Image (cartoon, rainbow, N blue to C red):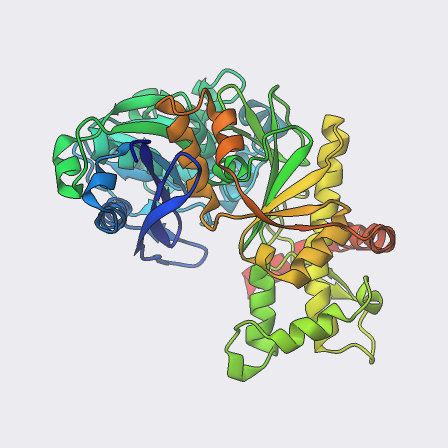
Amino acid sequence: MTDPLVIAIDSSTTATKAVVVDTSGKVLATGKADIDLLTPGMDMFEHDPTQWWTSTNTAITQACEALEEADRKRIKALCITHQRESFALVDEDGGALRPAILWLDSRAGAEIKEYGSDHIHELSGKPADTTPALYKIAWLKKHEPDTLKAAHKLVDVHAYLAHRLVGRWVSAVGSADTLNLLDIAVVDYSDELLDIAGVTREQMAELAAPASIIDPINPELLTEWGLGEGVVLVAGVGDGQAAGLGTSAIDEDVAYVNIGTSIVAGVHAFEYAYSPAYRTLLGGIPDSYVLEIVQNSGSVLANWFRTELGDPALEGGLDEELDRAAAELKPGTDGLLTVPYWNAVQSPHWDPFAKGSVVGFGSAHTRAHMYRSIIEGMALELRGNLERVQESTGRKLKELRCTGGGSRNPLYRRIFADATGLPLVVSGVEEVSAQGAAMMAMAAIGTYPDVAAASNGMASFVDRTEPDPEAYEIYGEWAAIQQDIYPALADIFTRINTVMKRS
């Protein structure tokens, strides 16, 4: 075999994975190394950024060792996808000045209130929320000003790894965009947003176009991994946008959804648009955008239920008997409705003080009812969010391309298909974000004419679930009620938060 291979790096919140992929999208080898999650205080989540590199190096080493020497010499490019919004402050040599602050960190509530506005949303494409780095950098400006000022660079994961790989502080535009510091319409840093954050343009990484070749990788690293000369680093994109590529959800009438710990869905667009219904990100296809829905509470809720209220012997693991009992119940779960805001809410309300609620309990309800209601709550939220995206953009979706642990569960697939009224097509690739990065790498080295062609040529699917039209209509009635619960309780959630802070 002489066809090229590429390495896709997916550096996530818990681990870095390296995946070696061929021109058809087949995975030939993988490697993985964990990253420690640091929790120095309430609502604070951090990493030692050194582990971004050590985990990447270990994962690549593992993947390359699993290949024959001839296959290692076929590797021509490496592309990075990664956890979004996380950032580190570094000196000129790349040494960390403090631990990196992560996307799930929510310390900057006061800064969100102070700086968040419709204008910032329009400028950056991102509604005011706990996730974007902008507000956490502004928190550093207030609480650690000397450290922020002393930083040679403020970098996302892509830029940090690129410096170790090629010796330059450079990020992909679709990676740096998630920091919420870009004027997204002109694809450049915004002086206004940089001023809010308290950083200078000189402190930011260079920007590279998606799927462009940045530089050849350090020859010493290539020798260490047993690779041939001239392997190049390709500009990647954040893991959410990469998942859209990995599932080949690139036509405007096809959406992707990752039914994982959280639920992230999105559609590609080729003109800039913004709306409270979604957040807008730069895509992995040049000159594209991703209109993204984010639901903080996904399968983590089902895991919570099984851990806290399920069979203790299973220790939170999958419960086939519980799944079977839940599957036998009718859509709407006999009037038990869940609003799945256990971890606040992003799309469509963007309320960090929101709480979860279960409404409609009766004496006939069982554990299976509550379990199914939680899954239905996630699915009904997705239905409403997808409807809002379609109304905002004037498009009609015809299919959902699915990935994540929930997509492998027949109960989830049935409920999500029926609730949304869309066929669910399951990706045949486990590491779908890495697959998206591999597609960008293949396009960059000319194996495919462009990223879209690589996405279409390298994607694979293993299952399709068609919606039941009757169930969809029934869910529509329940959805109309479920969607009214949060607005009725929003003031109560704010009052709860106020009392909790005083307690």
Kindly identify the residue that appears in the image at 66 percent across and 42 percent down.
Answer: 400
Rendering coords of residue 112 (x, y %):
53, 39
* Whether residue 2 can be seen here: yes
* Whether residue 198 can be seen here: no
Residue 307 figure quarter: bottom right
Q: Which of 349 and 366 is in front in this view?
A: 366
Kindly identify the residue that appears in the image at 48 percent across and 47 percent down.
Answer: 429
Q: Is residue 295 above or below residue 292?
A: below
Q: In this view, does 427 lie above or below 409?
A: above
Q: Is residue 246 left or right of residue 235?
A: right
Q: Is residue 500 above or below residue 229?
A: below
Rendering coords of residue 340 (x, y %):
67, 58
Q: Which residue lies furthest to the front in this view?
A: 1
Q: Which residue lies furthest to the top in this view?
A: 186
Kindly identify the residue that appears in the image at 61 percent across and 71 percent down.
Answer: 305
Q: In this view, does 244 lie to the left or right of 153?
A: right
Quadrant of the drawing holding the N terminus: top left
Rendering coords of residue 49 (x, y %):
28, 45
Quadrant of the drawing holding the C terminus: bottom right
Q: Which residue lies furthest to the bottom in this view?
A: 313
